[in-house]
Image (cartoon, rainbow, N blue to C red):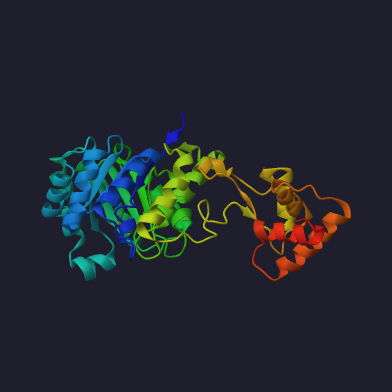
Amino acid sequence: MKDKVYIFDTTLRDGEQSPGASMGINEKLKVALQLEKLGVDIIEAGFAVSSPVQFDAIQLIAQEVKNAVIASLARAVEKDIDAAAQALKYAQRKRIHTFIATSPIHREFKLKKTKEEILKQAVYAIQYAKQYTDDVEFSAEDATRTELDYLVEVVTAAIDAGAKTINIPDTVGYTVPSEFTKIIRTLKEKVPNINQAVLSVHCHNDLGLAVANSLAAIEAGARQVEVSVNGIGERAGNAAMEEIVMALELRKDIFGVETGIVTQEIYKTSRLIVSVTGIQVQPNKAIVGKNAFSHEAGIHQDGVLKERRTYEIMKPEQIGRTHSEIVLGRHSGKHGLQARLKELGYTIQGDDFEKVFQKFTEVADKKKAVYDDELIAIVSECLSID
Ligand code: KIV
Ligand code: ZN
């Protein structure tokens, strides 16, 4: 039996904090129901105290979603925790996710509190949240820029206070994978009660390292990962769910862990997020980008037509896409063209094919791609077919 990595999806909370990504209540419910179908373990539905819409959306999701744990974020203060608990009242399975920043820069400039005061506040908040649910998660905001010995102290106290999940956020996406490995290893070695909680990571993508950092943390022993669909989130976003899940899925030889994700639902979920937020996915985005399964170069097309695994590490069907694509353009060769012509119902050989190929290369050289209707026109022109 492989270890399980819990997928904590924060598309509806951190993801919604992306500029321009705010969603209406019914859209949030639609996303939550799809996330449940996708098989995420925990849905962070919002930040209850932050607005009436957030509160109502969490409440509605808590009523409608039956299998996933529903979480609300709360600062380490009573009024936030009360609001989270109220919003989650009807959830079958609920989690209060409380946080306070621990790094020197946040202590000095944002909170204006000492290390001792912050530790005390964290412990109090966890104990306070426990009156509502046993499932309390604690995040040490900006953990990765916190002195490691102080982080060990805070995490130990948080677990003693009853936190069942300890989350280590790379709040500003500043950390590199080797540092993340060190942080997780140190916590595992130095926190005496670490086995009483699930160790989690929450990585931002300011240096484009959110996925790499999350994977380094999992390799070092983290067993919950906080992600968002398409990687949306504050500034450069959060770790992309689809990239982490498929890396864990395809590289079981390295990670040796499982998730409960139904990978065939990934693409549908990605498209739903695009449609409700209006935030497009870049064409070359791993897994869900338009070009992720497209082949243009002649050598690649030839390889894929002979055996898909030459240039595809996963099947498009694995993530719920219907097919990979041979894009005909100026880099394409005869094999790609011949295969597409066959799909269009033409069997053209010998000199006739050479004529069509010649014309195709002339047209392709002037354009980004040659589409089926243009190919049909080329064939008609070269072979005088009406
Ligand atoms: O990035 C962050 O630190 C967060 C916490 C609230 C978990 O989003
Ligand atoms: Zn975050």
Q: Nearer the viewer, residue 101 or 252?
A: 252
Q: Residue furthest top?
A: 1
Numbered disc total? 0
The residue that appears at 22% across and 48% down in the rendered structure is 58
- Measured as percent of width and height from the top left, residue 10 is found at 33, 51
- Identify which residue, 156 or 180, lies in the foreground: 180
Residue occupying the point 78% across, 64% down: 359
Left or right of 372? Residue 133 is: left
For the view shown, which residue lies furthest in the right direction?
A: 351
Residue 14 in the image, given as x and y percentages of width and height: 31, 56
Q: Quadrant of ligand 2?
A: bottom left
Q: Residue 112, image x and y in percent?
A: 18, 68
In this image, 207 relative to 148: left or right?
right
- The answer to whether residue 182 shows anywhere in this view is no
Residue 349 visible: yes
Q: Residue 326 vs residue 213: left or right?
A: right
Q: Residue furthest front?
A: 386
Q: Quadrant of the C terminus?
A: bottom right
Q: Position of residue 343 (x, y in %)?
A: 69, 46
User: Residue at left 53%, top 45%?
Assistant: 321
Q: Nearer the viewer, residue 113 or 63?
A: 63
